[in-house]
Amino acid sequence: MTTATARAFPNIALVKYWGKRDPALMLPATGSLSMTLDAFATTTTVELAPEASADAFLLGEAPAGGEALRRVTRFLDLVRGRAGSASPAIVRSRNEGPTAAGLASSASGFAALATAASAAYGLSPEPADLSRLARRGSGSAARSIVPGMAVWHAGDDATSYAEPVAAPELHMIPVVVDAAGKEISSREAMQRTADTSPFYPAWVESTTQTLDDMTAACRDGDFTRIGRLAESNALRMHAAIQGSFPPVRFLAPRSIAVFDAVRQLREAGLETYATADAGPNVVALARPEDSGDVAAELSSLGSARVVGPGPGAELLGDEEAA
Ligand code: PMV
């Protein structure tokens, strides 16, 4: 095969990945746990172009250059190394969700790219190897290889991959308060947090414990504990980020309003919790039977829709190409 198309979905972490133990190998400082969504897909086609002088990357209709293209080329270099190929490629990618606004487009993007590029270059990795490969593009992409709930192990190069984890069915309600791109990339903010935030060591230590607690809560199907742990872990991550120098703050007044509204709903008897990634948008968690009500209640604060657990990254037929 010299052309392949894959689709992958973003994931939202209940226990966050924030900080690298090894930036070159993209090994995380802690393990993390997330749910792959059934919305906001990225579809990516990789076509080998042996006659071309360099890779090309089209995001939507527009040719991408600069750092976006360099990241794709660096990633393809890894695939070419594994496949023993020197061929450039044309990569066409389209996102159904807001890019770089904290809804994990880099996770779906690199999961789709890893899957399509592996096939186009003639590799057929096992899921764990595909997850290890996706990790090298964007850490959280390791988890978007896996359907539904996934745990990504901190491990070393050979063992740091994501795999399915037992959990109850959960719905998420992304509340998009701002669809614009963020001012600082998660990569840069993550490094600054690790380098300068006095709260970073405490974040790493507490998250290691939270992951154990969350894994147990998922196994027990204990929604209340899952929600409490997830909301606390997200706010601890943002506290560590805000402790950076110079400071970084992703949460906007409208984000905080969603956290407050979620707490008020909970106090009024509708059980829901909130989390937020490296951007202003907030994601509420709910039991499937409550998610429609939660979305309706939060819709005055931003566009709110219910999403469920989605499939892992997969190859598509030609007719579905990007
Ligand atoms: O994979 P990256 O570099 O986009 O980092 C993602 C970090 C968070 O989304 C904030 C947390 C997570 O675990 O997904």
Image (cartoon, rainbow, N blue to C red):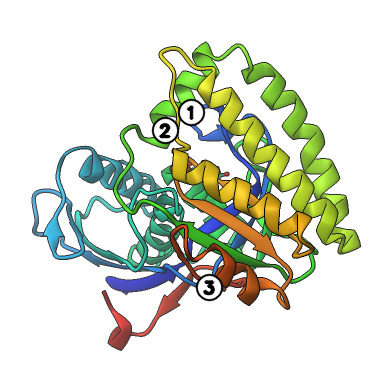
Q: Secondary structure at mark 3?
A: loop
User: Is the C-beta of the residue carrying label 2 under 8 Å from the nearest atom of ligand 1?
Assistant: yes
Looking at the image, the residue that sits furthest to the right is 220
Residue 187 is tagged as: 2
Q: Residue at x 23, y 38 (%)?
A: 67
* Frontmost residue, 141 versus 50: 141
The quadrant the C terminus occupies is bottom left
* Frontmost residue, 46 versus 279: 279
Residue 316 is tagged as: none
Q: Secondary structure at mark 2?
A: helix
Work out whether residue 151 can be spotted: no
Q: Residue at x 27, y 71 (%)?
A: 2
Q: Secondary structure at mark 1?
A: helix
Q: Are marks 1 and 2 in contact (CB under 8 Å)?
A: yes
Q: Quadrant of residue 97?
A: bottom left
Task: Please tell me which of labels 3 and 1 falls first in the chain.
Answer: 3
Q: Quadrant of residue 234?
A: top right
Q: Amino acid at mark 2?
A: Arg
Residue 38 is tagged as: 3
Residue corresponding to mark 1? 190
Residue 168 position (above or below residue 261): below
Q: Residue at x 68, y 33 (%)?
A: 30
Q: Amino acid at mark 3?
A: Asp
The quadrant the N terminus occupies is bottom left
x and y percent of residue 151 in the render? 70, 52
Q: Is residue 200 left or right of residue 106?
A: right
